[in-house]
Every structure is written in structure tokens, then in C-alpha cells.
Image (tube, rainbow, N blue to C red):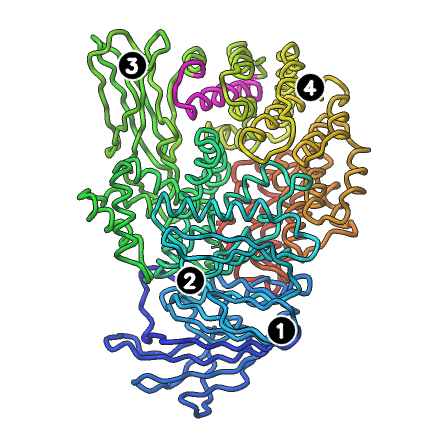
Amino acid sequence: PQTIHLKDYTPFGYEIESVHLTFRLAPGATRVISKIAFAPTPAAADKRFFLHGEELKLLSAKIDGAEITPRMVEGGLEADVPDVPFTWEAEVEIAPESNTALEGLYMSNGMYCTQCEAEGFRKITFYPDRPDVMAVFTVRIEGDLPVLLSNGNPVTKGDGFAEWHDPWPKPSYLFALVAGELINHPGFFTTKSGREVELNIWVRPGDEGKCAFGMQALKDSMKWDEDTYGREYDLDIFNIVAVDDFNMGAMENKGLNIFNSSCVLASKETSTDANFERIEGIIAHEYFHNWTGNRITCRDWFQLCLKEGLTVYRDQMFSGDMRSHAVKRIEEVLTLRARQFREDNGPLAHPVRPESFVEINNFYTATVYEKGAEIIGMLRRLVGDEDYKKGCELYFARHDGQAVTIEDWLKAFEDATGRDLAHFKQWYSQAGTPRLKMSETWEDGTLTLSFSQSTPPTPGQSEKKPQLIPIAVGLIGPNGDEVVPTTVLEMTEAEQSFTFEGLGARPVASVLRDFSAPVILEREIDAKTRAFLLAHDTDPFQKWEMGRTLAKDTLLAMIVKGTDPSHAYLDAIKSVVTDESLDPAFRALSLGLPSQDDLAQSLHDAGIIPNPQKIYEARESLRHILSDHLREVIPALYAENDAGAFTPDAEGSGKRSLRLAILALLSLRDEGVTARALYKRADNMTEQAGALQALLAAGHGKEELAAFAERWKDDRLVMDKWFMMQVAAAAPDRAATVAKSLSEHADFTMKNPNRFRAVFGALAGNHAGFHHESGAAYRLLADQLITLDALNPQTTARMSGAFETWKRYDADRQQLIRAELERILATPGLSRDTTEMVTRILS
Ligand code: B3K
Ligand code: ZN
């Protein structure tokens, strides 16, 4: 397969004045008729007329009405065209019914739908399928189905057909079509300038009761983008469609967002608080793309973070405003460390703006998305809120309707703020997580903080340069009062010191407040000082972080030295959990222990080969010790944090999360009596699933598991939870067996990515089970990936990331994994997607 390089970018030699598409829908043979008005770009260096096209049966092609025979070349076709404006017409046939890759036009439960980002449009018709070619689309859909949708505004509708016109020029990746028997949940929004917008959430009959929450989230997002970024919606209609078979979360097609049904359907009976929060965030994310992604798009796919990093940052701020910034920030950091740091520290590490790829779908990564969002957060911290706003406004004003680059984004900020961002820009090109070491000295009322930074080598980048790191610092006096409020230190050198003068008594520094940069902070700090900050820090992230690092050190000492947990840790946690002045959601997060995967990475970083079984045992043992240490406060905490009637907001969900965290500890001591009672009584999925998980994690729950399946057998999204919970809770020596037998269950299907992920994503996430010394889980996952690759390369490639950490482990495990990866790679006809991923993981 061919490698594409950023440095090779050349513009397409033609502009498109209009695109007309007609679809004659039929499951096995859909006709797509295209009529495209091209005009040569006068100054173009490259006049080659190449149209992408894959898996298309070309029936006819015409230029200015005359039949031609184009030259079929790899990945598309070429034709000789006039050097004046001309019309291209083509008729092709495609087979949505047999499209199991879920890219291009495909079918899901009898409904037609599309997924074009990144390069799926070329499976629909011949086209310059690249984001820098923007055009106005008119679409006619013919088919015997009640609902026929495409982008833009509706033009006409009749018996068996509908026409849509999208006035906003867009790249082909934002094209969408949906056709089927769908029911709408309607809504309405008036924009700030008075445009009346019809809103719809389209679902399969039976799901209409699960749309209200998503609709409210959509309205909240529309309002928020007006209030916060001054961005208004620009069409008469905004449609969301729920689809069961979908490779990722959702897609921001212009005016017609398509969602994985798990990311839009919500009801208290079937969705957990985490589901509600995620749905709200994803609806916002896709909606926000209307400006950051659609109105202003990417010049090429190397610029993916231009829209994704910025849009993630925007959805994070929205969720913080809707819920709690403190809690949201902690959750973001948890995800960043679990996914992005993991990626950055292994063979798949790449810059936020990669320089080359084989298959672009493999670069929709935690690095592009989450680290991309961290870069926006750092930029904002460096320039300040006012200048951030000015920079965004200039960016929107200057580039509306264009396909642009990271350089354009940064230039808008340089011009708006007068700041030189050359050094800052390196965050986009240098991969790897910087390690930031800190030491401190105290003399005559002056505190000096000395930092040194280094970034370990990553694939293709052996030498690293110092980054510009914003370090947010505050100082706490010995009596617990804040003596210096948060200030941002700008570190630019490999080593740098900062002083705070005129201090009365030696303060304790709170460093990297709000997680002001995506780095690993290594700081000499004793348990007492941590406990002090845990008690007194005014920064909620650092307060949580101190508890977290105490827990981590405790676990690492248990694993490596077999020591008992320190009282410093146990007492500190007890005082946080029982501190009623703190948000219950925060207290629940403080009770959480670092994941096994996180501990394995920390051991590896310390030069110790992680033993997954030992990590598992230490963590289980600490759960028992915590349960014992907190036994006197547990009953009251459980009783007091009953949230009462279910509301999916931050307050209710915070109480439930604390109560369920307590229940998990209690279940280790009461034979599951309390959890069983809650399971029976629960009128919402958060408590029902939480109780069941607490039972399973304490070795109970057999009956409840069966009752759960009986009750929910007809609800595919709830059944995903049933599949997932069993694999997640399986003991290390049972995980592969459990996953295998679930994959043989009548309701298991590889064609539904949600179901596949429920079982095999959970297997990869069951650290000690996945890395069980027998190698059974490695083998099972490899078998499954080999089979899935023939159906769905994208999901296969993504799931192969389960193996990305293999070099952390001992020689035997490495040998087992290497053999599986090589077996996958040797599969005849293996997709480009999976080939690229497995090759990179092995390298
Ligand atoms: N832009 C899409 C992701 C497309 C993934 C293509 N493999 C969803 C999002 O980030 O909003
Ligand atoms: Zn996105």
C-alpha cells in the first residue's frame, strides 16, 4: 500500500460549480447518476483530471453530453478534459446491501445510510474525494420508502422521491443520505437572528420514547454556540438520525448528522448517567462541527486536528458549563491518560498533525482528538480568555467557506493577539508525552521551582526539542490558605527556574493546576505534603490528583514490595469521602483507583516489568482494605446519597456515582445483600447496572445476570451492556472463556460494531484477563480480528490497538503477542487498514 505524505500536497486543478446527484435506491443495485460542473483553475500546476472511485461499476461517462471511455487507474479514473468549464456525467451501480464495511452507502436494519468521512464518498460515485474540493450539492433520492433525507434544505417531496439542496459549499466527506422507515421526534429552535429551524431526531419505530434528552441537548448546544462563540445555525432544518450499525460515535454531515444509536437514544430505564453525559457531549460535538469542520474545513487529512481538536475542546467546555467544570476536567484527564498517554508511549505514537499515513481512518486517534483539544486549551491559557475570543473571531471571519491548515489557525491567533506562536506550534509536530521534573528550594522568603523537561523518542522522531509548557501554579501557606493564586509559568527551555519572592513562611506549591499541559509531572513529594494538598488545595484537579497519586504509590508499593497500604492514604481518602462540603461526584472520583493498565505503564516507566496477575491482586486487595477501613462510614454514606427521583443532571448523577462506588465496597462485605436489594428496586439503568456490576465484582450476581437478560432481551443497546459487563468482570483465568462463549451466543453478531466492541473491547480492557499467561485471550482476539477484517476493516484496525502496549510485558507474553500479530499480518487479503496498524504495532 501507498504512503501519503503531508509534504506532497498539491491542489486539485479544477473547481466545482455544482454537483447534482440522483440516487435510484435498490438494496443490491443502486444507481447513482452524477452531473458535475467543473472549471479548470487558471493557475493550476497539476492539470491531471483524476476522480477517486472504489468498488463502483461504471455504466456510462460523458463530457459535455458526449460519451467517453475514461482510463481506469488505481483508486479511480482519469479522463482528457477541455481547458474550459465542462460538465461531467456518470452513472454507476453500487450494492449497499452487501456493504459490511459500513463506509459509503450501506444498509442497517433495512435502512439506507452513508458514512463518507474520511474517504467513503468514492464508494458512492467518481469524484475528487478530498476535503479541499468544496461544492454546492443538489440531491434527488428515488426509492419506495417513507423517509428520504439528504443534506441542506428540502426542495420537493413526492411519492417515492425527494430533492434536497445544500446551499453551503462542502467537501464530499460531509455528504449524507438516509432512507427508510423512520419516525421523527420533532423540535424547534429560533436562532439569535430569528431564523426558525426545524429539528428532528429520526429513529426506528419503537425508539421514539428515547429522543427527548437528545433533542434538549441539541437545543442547548445551538444556544451555547451562539452565546459562547457567536456561531449561528445556517439552514432551515437540522436532522439527526440514529443508526444501529455504525463504526464510530457519530458523524457531522451538513444538516444531517448520523449517529450510532448508542450515542443518541436515551431513557432513564435503559441509559446510565455515563450514557446521558456522553450523549449530551456527542450531540454538542457534532453540532459544533457545523462551524469548526463544515463552514471551515480541513485542506487535507493531515489537518484533521484542526477540526477535531478544536471541536473536542468546544464540546468539553460545553459539558463543563452544563455540568461541572471540576468533575469534567478530572474525567478528561482520566481519558487522556488512559488513551492518549498510552498511545504516545507505544509504537503507535504520532504527532497531533501526522506527517504521513497509509489509511487515514487509522488516524482518528486519541492523539489527534484529545491531545489536539489539550493544545487548544494551552493556547487559550497562554493568550487569555479575551484574546482567545479575538483569535477565534478572526479565524471565523477570515476563513469561512475555506479548507485550511493549522498554519491558518495559528496565524489568526498571531494576528489577533500579536503573539509569536512559532515555538507553541511544535505541539502539533512533536509526538510523545513530555516528562516534566520539578524540584524546589526555599531561602529567605523566596521559593524557587526548578523544572527540567524531556520527551522520550517516538517512532520516526529520535531527537526531541523542548516544548513551550504552560505550568499553572498556586501556593498554599502552612495554615492552608492560598498565598499566591494561580499563575501561569511559561516554560520554554529544557531547564528553567521560577521564583516567588517575599513570602512569609514556606508554602506548598500546587503545580500543574487544572492539568494545564499534557505532560507527566515527576515531583519529589512526600505523602504528608500530598495529604496536605489533598486537604487544602483550592484547585479541584490538583486536589483530586493528590489522592490519585497517593493511591498509585500505595498500589505500586503493594505490587513491588508487598507493603501494606499507608494510613496516610487510607485516612486521607476517608476524610475526602466523608467531607460533605465536597461535590459527591468529586468524592466518587477520589474513591476510584488507578486502572490496571495505568499501573502497568507506571511500572514499565520505572523500569519494572509489569506482572498483570500481581497488579490485579494488589488492586483487589486494596479494594478489600478500603472496604474494611471505611466500614463505619459506609452505611451512612450509602443512605445519605440516595438521589431520589431520577434526573439525568450533574446533581443526581453525582450522588448516584458516589453511592454506587460505596456499594461496590459494601458488596465485598455483605454478601451482596444491599446490591441485590438495589437491583430489585432500581427504576433506572444507572442503579440497575451499577448494582449488577457491584455484585459481579464481588463474585455474586448470577441470578441477576439472568434476570437482566430476560428483561432486556429485546433492547439491543441494553444487551450490549449485558455482554460487556460479563467480560469486564470475569476473573483473569476466565476472561477468554467468557468472551468466547458470549461470541457464540445467539445474539452475538460481528456485523454490529457495538456488539463486537461490547465483547472484545471489554476483553481488551480486562487487563489481567487479556494478558493472562496462557495467551488464550491474545489468541481469541486475533482469531476474531482475522474474521472481522474481511467484513469491516475499520473496526478491526481500531481494535487491533489492544496489542499496542505489548512491549511493556515479559518475554513470554511478548512472544505470544508477536506470534498473534504475525498471524494476523499473514492473513491473505488483509485490509490496508489492519495491515498498517499491525505493521506499526510490530515495528
Ligand atoms: N468526524 C467524525 C469521525 C469520522 C471517522 C472516520 N473514520 C466524527 C467526529 O469526530 O465528530
Ligand atoms: Zn469530531
Q: Is residue 659 magenta?
A: no
Q: Is residue 553 magenta?
A: yes
Q: Earlier in the sequence, mark 1 or mark 2?
A: 2
Q: Which residue is mark 4?
A: 666
Q: Earlier in the sequence, mark 4 or mark 2?
A: 2
Magenta part of the chain: 534-561
Q: Count residues near mark 2 (Cα–Cα under 10 Å), then give few for <14, some for 14-19, many for 20+.
A: few
Q: Which residue is mark 2?
A: 3
Say left or right for 413 vs 584. left
SS assignment at label 4: helix
Which disc number belongs to residue 483?
3
Can residue 773 be seen?
no
Number of marks in the image?
4
Picture quadrant of residue 750: bottom right
Tell me the chief SS of the magenta region. helix
Question: Residue type at mark 3?
Answer: Val
